[in-house]
Image: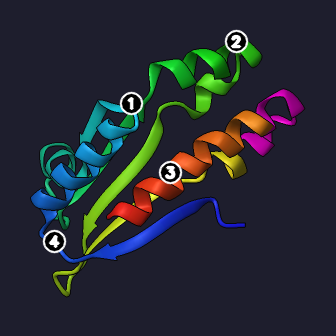
Amino acid sequence: MKPFFSKIVNAGFEESIQNVTGILKDYGFGIITEVDVKDTFKKKIDTNFRPYRILGACNPNYAFKALSKDDKVGIMLPCNVIVQEHEDGSVEITIINPEVSVKALHNPDLEDFACEVTGVMRKVMARL
């Protein structure tokens, strides 16, 4: 099983960010962090990079449940979503697979929960 879900979408970069953000919101996820990699690389190391944004998606109810089961799961929060534009102009959206990532913690209490969140992420991908 892959550690992420990925899809080339039929939309521009900024539109794709709006689309995935809106769909995540429908499932109770808000974007609590946003890293503009292109801008950061330009400012910090004066180099050019393609449009690439890392969105930190969080559903407070899921986060509370996860942290209640294992205090180390915070290292894997929020659920990262990548929106990137490739050199050919295509835009790809990639979302973490929580079911795979929590296996690293070896906590069986998180497995059913992670399957539930993974199901939501699959629904998000299907709507893109």
Q: Amino acid at mark 2?
A: Ser
Marks 3/2: CA–CA distance: 21 Å
Disc 4, SS: loop
Marks 3/1: CA–CA distance: 12 Å
Q: Does the magenta portion include 85?
A: no
- The residue singled out by tag 4 in the image is 11
The label nearer to you, 2 versus 1, is 1
Identify which residue is drawn at 22% across, 80% down. Answer: 90
Question: Which quarter of the rendered picture does the C terminus lie within?
Answer: bottom left
* 28 or 67: nearer the viewer: 28
Disc 2, SS: helix
Q: Amino acid at mark 4?
A: Ala
Residue 28 has which mark? 1
Looking at the rendering, the stretch of residues picked out in magenta corresponds to: 102-111
Q: Around disc 1, counting alpha carbons within 10 Å, would you say few (fewer than 14), some (14 to 19), or many (20 or more)? A: some
Q: Does the magenta portion include 109?
A: yes
- The residue singled out by tag 3 in the image is 121
Q: Amino acid at mark 1?
A: Gly
Identify which residue is drawn at 40% across, 38% down. Answer: 27
Q: Quadrant of residue 4?
A: bottom right
- The residue singled out by tag 2 in the image is 68
